[in-house]
Image (cartoon, rainbow, N blue to C red):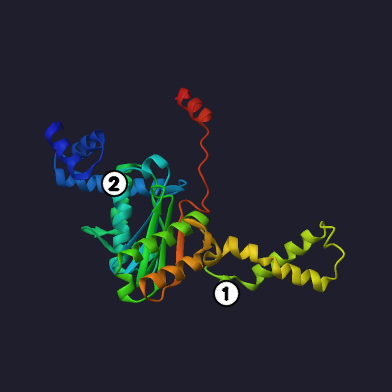
Amino acid sequence: MAVSAKDVMELRRQTDCGMMECKKALVKADGDINKAIEILREEGLATAAKKAGRIAAEGMVYAVATANGAVVVEVNAETDFVAKNDKFVEFTKDLANVVAEQKPADVEALMGCKMGEGTVDEALKALILVIKENIKVRRFASYEGHCAAYVHGGGTHGVIVKFDTTDEVAAKPEFVEFGKDIAMQIAAANPSYLNREAVPAEAIENEKKIIIAQMANDPKAANKPDAIKEKMATGRLGKFYKENCLVDQAFIKDGNMDVNAYVNATAKKLGGDIKIVEYTHFIKGEGLEKRVDDFAAEVAAAVKG
């Protein structure tokens, strides 16, 4: 049957689907817009399932501090272009709010949380229908208490940090700026550990073995007794700590002090105690397989029809 342009536009307005998809759905639904919406949703579920096997290593990370905590989430898509789509960005930010408000235990629980008029899972499938790429909610982390959040590079890095301090100190504007500084430090320097106490014994022993092995090529140290080499290796661990432990790292805004000194100076300035308790740093697509496009093959396939 013939469908009117007005109905096609109305269906598109309600679903954000393409013009041709809306027209086909209306034809199948004999012009019934509500039935056409159901058809598109059904096709959307099929589309989501079909795209689920595609590699999704792009996307964005988003972090936000709330009145009583902080949340960081990562949502992946197939291409960087889609990651800049307004609807994709809106979904990711809304997802962070869902985590903050409903406090799911894990991603599986998050998918069943309420979002809009349905669930996160339903909202995700609707987004896949519109964007036409595989999209996955990969991970999230959240803290409660006095926190800071930072997003870098439009969503390439997201950091949340939890602090132990008083309500009075946390309420000061200077503390907000301080929290952002610490989160930026983590994004820029990517420390592996909070402090020396957090470094596993295995990691320390492995680093000492590397240092001792390097001594074999040092004429001044090669012939020293093993006990002396062990002490020298322990002494040289300072460099490892300065590179890998947050509080020992040089502060990015002032290389003349380390992060611990900056924390102490800020605490003194604000008239209270401040301690960094923990942090989470998400890097977009970290550890995921990246899609490699063979454009020559794509062109050849297109030519063959």
> In the rendered image, which residue does mark 2 sit on?
87
Numbered circle sitting on residue 197: 1
**Foreground pick, 92 / 134:** 92
Write the residue at 40% across / 67% down: 106
Q: Is residue 117 left or right of residue 128?
A: left
Residue 298 placement (x, y as % from top left): 49, 30
Tell me which label, 1 or 2, sits earlier in the chain: 2
Disc 1 crowd rating (10 Å Cα; few below 14, some 14-19, many 20+) is few
Numbered circle sitting on residue 124: none
Q: Quadrant of residue 277?
A: bottom left
* Quadrant of the drawing holding the N terminus: top left
Question: Circle 2 sits in a helix, a strand or a loop, which is it?
Answer: helix
Question: How far is disc 1 from disc 2 in space, using C-alphas?
Answer: 43 Å
Residue 205 placement (x, y as % from top left): 70, 70
User: Could one spot residue 227 in this view of the protein?
Assistant: yes
Give the amino acid type for the residue marked by disc 1 in the picture.
Answer: Glu
Disc 2 crowd rating (10 Å Cα; few below 14, some 14-19, many 20+) is some
Q: Quadrant of residue 217?
A: bottom right
Residue 54 placement (x, y as % from top left): 45, 46
